[in-house]
Amino acid sequence: MKTIGLLGGVSWHSTVDYYKYINTMVNQRLGGNNAAKCIIYSINFNDVYNAAYRNDFETISALVTDACLKLELSGADCIGLSANTIHRFAADVIKKVNIPLIHIAEETAKVVRKQNITKAGLIGTKLTMEDEFYCNKLSKGGIEVIIPNDIDRQYIHDKILGELTQGVFNNDTKKTLLAIIEKLNKQGAEGIILGCTEIPLLISQADCTIPVFDTTYIHSEALVEFALG
């Protein structure tokens, strides 16, 4: 079994789910007392938040790449960045480390296409929804991406940073997010990508009438496949 290197803490709430999913999947595959060989380097999300507020992407890149180098030096065989938005710095990490980075958007595109879906709604932080680093990966995977309007994008972004990353799960927020998903469906989205690893803590497939893609679960599955493949 290979060792998974997981960059955590962005936020720690979703890192908990990564650890649970990864170990559950390994045990389901191997049985008995088997669990994942996994190294987690958890960074302080407040450092990332403050740098993002200043649009200081160089500092965030340095925080992320430094953590990934430490994972490599600690014996990790691959890197998993446990947040969609942090993949804005995936290219920087790839330049620095000598082990594979399993990209969350690439893996998500594969799973979406397996369900014969070519148009998918995407919800996440503003950077994830608006920046090319994420949508381009989905497009290259054969997915036409539909994103919410300006007002809805701002709402989602604010709720992620103001509530979900702080462990606050509000029923009114859930209702509004589901209404936004319904709008995307009416615009032609055949499925919805939960492009923030905190959103699945609030919304699941049971809440929606169209396929929902939990990127935390999908990414965890890909990391386990690498470790056991």
Image (cartoon, rainbow, N blue to C red):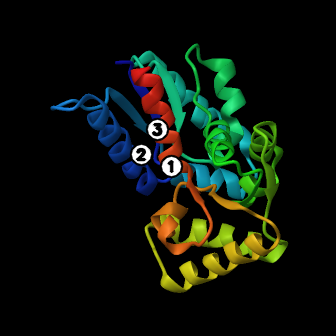
**Residue at the spot of label 1:** 216
State the residue at coordinates (75%, 38%).
Answer: 141
Farthest residue toward the left?
A: 32
Q: Is 95 on the left or on the right of 9, as rendered? A: right
Dot 3 crowding, Cα within 10 Å, few <14, some 14–19, many 20+:
some
Q: Assign a secondary structure to mark 1.
A: helix
State the residue at coordinates (75%, 43%).
Answer: 138
Farthest residue toward the front?
A: 116
Hey, what amino acid is under mark 2? Tyr
Using the image as rendered, state which of residue 205 and residue 67 is in the foreground: 205
Determine whether 187 is above or below 80 in the image.
Answer: below
State the residue at coordinates (21%, 32%).
Answer: 31
Q: Is 89 on the left or on the right of 135, as rendered? A: left
**Residue at the spot of label 3:** 221
Farthest residue toward the bottom?
A: 172
Hey, what amino acid is under mark 1? Thr
Q: Quadrant of residue 21?
A: top left
Q: Is 46 on the left or on the right of 192, as rendered? A: left
Ranked by sequence position, the earlier of labels 3 and 2 is: 2
In three-dimensional space, the C-alpha distance between marks 2 and 1, rounded to whole angstroms, equals 6 Å
Mark number, residue 9:
none
Q: Assign a secondary structure to mark 2.
A: helix
Q: Nearer the viewer, mark 1 or mark 3?
A: 3
In three-dimensional space, the C-alpha distance between marks 3 and 2, rounded to whole angstroms, equals 9 Å
Across and down, in percent, residue 25 comes to 35, 39
In three-dimensional space, the C-alpha distance between marks 1 and 3, rounded to whole angstroms, equals 9 Å
Hey, what amino acid is under mark 3? Glu
Which of the image's four quarters has the C terminus? top left
Q: Assign a secondary structure to mark 3.
A: helix
Q: Quadrant of residue 41?
A: top left
State the residue at coordinates (82%, 71%).
Answer: 187
**Residue at the spot of label 2:** 18
